[in-house]
Image: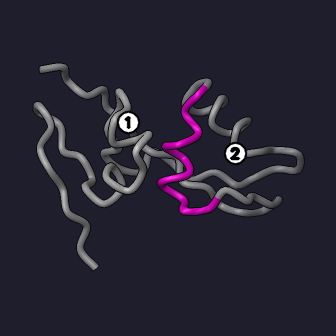
Amino acid sequence: YEIGVRLVGSEMCIRDRNKSDARVRTGAYCIVGVKQVVKVKRGQTLSSISRLYLGPGMECYIEVMNKNKELKEGDRVKIPELKRKHKK
């Protein structure tokens, strides 16, 4: 399986990830890779993990990277590496 990439300004974007969700496609950031993988702890939610690693309102990027909204203790979650898109 090959992941397509495209050039946005001077940044490479992972095409499959950035086109799969309208919130990511039209958002201010481009997914350029996986920053880290974390293990879900008891009581953590997608929203709490997003706030901890990316900031408030960034859940869509974690959803797209992991293709799953339901988390349970012990799951491994990919935290995306994000780059700000350049305005034209």
Identified at 65% across, 29% down, the residue is: 51
Q: Name above or below for residue 47 compared with residue 87.
A: below
For mark 2, does the 10 Å Cα neighbourhood hold few (<14), some (14 to 19), or many (20 or more) residues?
A: many
In this view, which residue lies farthest toward the right? 43
Q: Marks 1 and 2: in contact by CB < 8 Å?
A: no
Q: Please tell me whether residue 2 belongs to the stretch shown in magenta.
A: no
The reply, left or right, for residue 34 in relation to residue 45 is left
Of the numbered discs 2 and 1, the one sitting upstream in the chain is 2
Q: CA distance from mark 2 to mark 1?
A: 17 Å
Three-letter amino acid code at disc 1? Leu
The secondary structure that dominates the magenta segment is helix
- The quarter of the image holding the C terminus is top left
Residue 38 at x, y percent in the picture: 63, 51
From the viewer's side, name the closer residue of 52 and 86. 86
Identified at 62% across, 62% down, the residue is: 68
Q: Name above or below for residue 57 compared with residue 81.
A: above
Find residue 82 and name its label.
1
From the viewer's side, name the closer residue of 28 and 75. 28
Residue 41 at x, y percent in the picture: 81, 50
Image quarter of residue 7: top left
Identified at 11% across, 33% down, the residue is: 10
Q: Please tell me whether residue 58 belongs to the stretch shown in magenta.
A: yes
The reply, left or right, for residue 68 in relation to residue 17 is right
Q: How many labels, in total?
A: 2
The reply, left or right, for residue 2 in relation to residue 62 is left
Find residue 46 and name its label.
2
Local SS, label 2: helix
Residue 45 at x, y percent in the picture: 77, 45
Q: Name above or below for residue 51 compared with residue 78.
A: above
